[in-house]
């Protein structure tokens, strides 16, 4: 008997008899599918694209296989590591070798290192030379007012943009804070909730009397607690995680159907009917076309698509319009370039531009961050990712041909990195829906409201970046928790008629 007083054999039988359909085979869907498959449920993953992985899509570039989306994860929390362990990839986990960040296109200054002693770009000391180099004397004197103004004139301000402007002025906001939020999340500082991004900042501001002192205090506390958790990845690239999970799922007899877009989910009595696109044709292992079934029947459904489809599919089930998607359109151009001058990392690994000064938002030298990649590419060859698009502006690459988008990325990378890049050995362009982070103003509140409605429908779950907040660490932890909730509710529900 279990602690809940159930017979273990009954529980195993109940798991075996439970049909789960996971809609979407990105990392959230795969993590949720794994949770359900682990206890022996009969799981099917329906993925619209020809391959699993979603944003962890794979590309071939200059003879090397890499991912076009995320390159690593924040090790905060440990959920991704746990999934990596389950996937059998523990020995491939690596840490970023280089994290130095620069700022580019700073008006009248050009490119300079981003001040290290900061949180979210807010410096702990406006008089530090690295800060003055970015914001000039005028900006520094304005930022200094933060030290002499009473903290309560601003109250408990949650809007990052408003807080920084009020305490430290427009130059700190535009040149130090906005490059990080736009480059990293595609969001303006005015769209970030300080209370979620750095929960203890406002209290520290009240306690210490200034925003700079608050940043200094929190940095000291973080250092005592071991510092910021490192950025991790897999030797060989993130798409391996998708392959390894797919293999684990196959071992548990999980059915994986790619090229299968779910159009509609309907609750009929105690079950769900999951309707896939009519043109879908099943192809067996030998490549033979088989019977196409437009509908799957499930006891549990976990919606794990991107934001647009999730709002549509859940809206149908909940009988209400869940509104428009708020994800940001982001285009990433990945370039493999031959330029030995980049071996010395003239501008660190990540360069963010001051928003509104050019076409691209950031350039990352992935071959500087990941030693395995540098090893594969060899000296003198580098892999760069150039990001376009934020909530302020559609990607500058939008509407361009691939060749023109790649040329724009190349010339932007030259400007950001301060070196000529005449030799492009390979290039790839990809378009993504970048979900808002959990620190976006209103994101957690909206997610909680949708989750509460979803939890009101038996056997329904929702996972994915748009609901958990973007970032692999969050996505994976949240997908595990949500799948666990749905799974437990099913396994430990009283028998009908009892
Ligand atoms: C360019 C970029 C870079 C990033 N870099 C990082 C990083 O370095 N570190 C980090 O931690 N995070 C990063 N992120 C965030 C992270 O990648 C995402 O939060 C995470 O991968 C989202 O996973 P997901 O499964 O929720 O969504 P997705 O990966 O989008 O998966 C959703 C899946 O659902 C499928 N689908 C959609 N509609 C349907 C339908 N109707 N029927 C069936 N299937 C459907 C899609 O084809 C897709 O495969 C990055 C994101 C982007 C866009």
Image (spheres, rainbow, N blue to C red):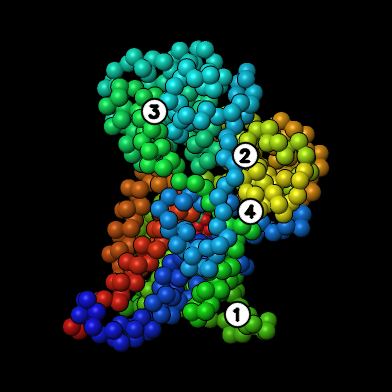
In the rendered image, the quadrant that contains the C terminus is: bottom left
Graded by Cα atoms within 10 Å as few (under 14), some (14 to 19) or many (20 or more), the crowding at tag 1 reads: some
> Between marks 1 and 2, how big is the CA–CA gap?
44 Å
Q: Which residue is mark 3?
A: 216
Using the rendered image of the protein, determine whether residue 273 is visible from the camera's viewpoint: no
Q: Which residue is mark 4?
A: 68
Q: Position of residue 117 (x, y in %)?
A: 47, 29
Q: Is residue 471 above or below residue 196?
A: below
Name the mark nearer the viewer: 4 or 3: 3
At 34% across and 86% down in the image, what residue appears?
A: 13
Mark seen at residue 282: 1
Q: Secondary structure at mark 2?
A: loop
> Between marks 4 and 3, how big is the CA–CA gap?
36 Å
Q: Is residue 69 above or below residue 345?
A: below
Q: Position of residue 140 (x, y in %)?
A: 48, 15
Graded by Cα atoms within 10 Å as few (under 14), some (14 to 19) or many (20 or more), the crowding at tag 4 reads: many
Task: Give the side of residue 13 with respect to residue 5, left or right.
Answer: right
Residue 363 found in image quarter: top right
**Circle nearer the N terminus (4, 3):** 4
Disc 4 residue: CB within 8 Å of ligand 1 = yes
Q: Secondary structure at mark 1?
A: loop
Given residues 209 and 469, the one toward you in this image is 209
Name the mark nearer the viewer: 1 or 3: 3
**Circle nearer the N terminus (4, 2):** 4
Graded by Cα atoms within 10 Å as few (under 14), some (14 to 19) or many (20 or more), the crowding at tag 2 reads: many
Q: Position of residue 376 (x, y in %)?
A: 72, 54
């Amino acid at each position: 008997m279990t602690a809940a007083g159930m017979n273990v054999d009954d529980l195993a039988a109940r798991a075996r008899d439970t049909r789960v359909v996971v809609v979407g085979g990105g990392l959230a869907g795969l993590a949720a599918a794994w949770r359900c498959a682990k206890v022996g449920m009969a799981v099917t993953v329906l993925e619209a694209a020809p391959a699993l992985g979603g944003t962890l899509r794979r590309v071939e570039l200059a003879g090397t296989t890499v991912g076009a989306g995320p390159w690593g994860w924040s090790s905060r929390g440990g959920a991704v590591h746990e999934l990596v362990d389950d996937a059998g990839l523990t020995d491939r986990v690596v840490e970023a070798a280089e994290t130095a960040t620069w700022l580019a296109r700073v008006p009248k200054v050009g490119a300079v290192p981003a001040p290290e002693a900061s949180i979210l770009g807010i410096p702990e000391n406006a008089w530090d030379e690295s800060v003055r180099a970015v914001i000039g004397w005028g900006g520094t004197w304005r930022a200094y007012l933060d030290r002499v103004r009473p903290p309560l004139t601003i109250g408990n301000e949650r809007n990052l943009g408003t807080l920084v402007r009020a305490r430290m002025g427009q130059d700190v906001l535009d040149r130090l804070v906005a490059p990080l939020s736009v480059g990293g999340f595609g969001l303006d500082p005015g769209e970030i909730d300080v209370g979620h991004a750095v929960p203890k900042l406002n209290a520290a501001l009240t306690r210490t009397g200034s925003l700079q002192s608050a940043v200094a205090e929190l940095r000291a506390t973080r250092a005592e607690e071991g510092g910021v958790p490192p950025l991790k990845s897999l030797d060989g690239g993130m798409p391996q995680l998708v392959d390894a999970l797919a293999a684990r799922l196959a071992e548990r007899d999980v059915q994986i159907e790619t090229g299968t877009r779910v159009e509609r989910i309907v609750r009929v009595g105690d079950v769900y009917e999951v309707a896939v696109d009519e043109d879908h044709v099943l192809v067996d292992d030998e490549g033979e076309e088989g019977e196409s079934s437009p509908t799957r029947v499930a006891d549990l459904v976990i919606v794990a698509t991107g934001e647009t489809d999730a709002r549509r599919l859940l809206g149908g089930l909940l009988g209400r319009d869940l509104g428009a998607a708020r994800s940001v359109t982001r285009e990433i151009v990945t370039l493999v370039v031959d330029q030995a001058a980049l071996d010395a990392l003239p501008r660190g690994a990540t360069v963010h531009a001051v928003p509104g000064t050019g076409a691209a938002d950031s350039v990352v030298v992935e071959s500087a961050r990941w030693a395995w990649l540098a090893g594969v590419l060899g000296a003198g060859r580098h892999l760069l990712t150039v990001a376009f698009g934020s909530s302020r502006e559609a990607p500058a690459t939008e509407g361009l041909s691939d060749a023109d988008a790649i040329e724009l990325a190349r010339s932007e990378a030259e400007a950001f990195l301060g070196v000529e890049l005449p030799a492009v050995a390979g290039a790839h362009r990809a378009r993504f829906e970048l979900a808002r982070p959990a620190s976006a103003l209103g994101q957690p509140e909206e997610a909680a409201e949708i989750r509460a409605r979803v939890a009101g429908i038996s056997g329904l779950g929702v996972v994915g970046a748009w609901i958990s907040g973007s970032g692999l660490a969050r996505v994976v932890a949240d997908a595990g928790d949500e799948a666990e909730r749905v799974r437990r509710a099913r396994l430990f529900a009283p028998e009908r008629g009892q």
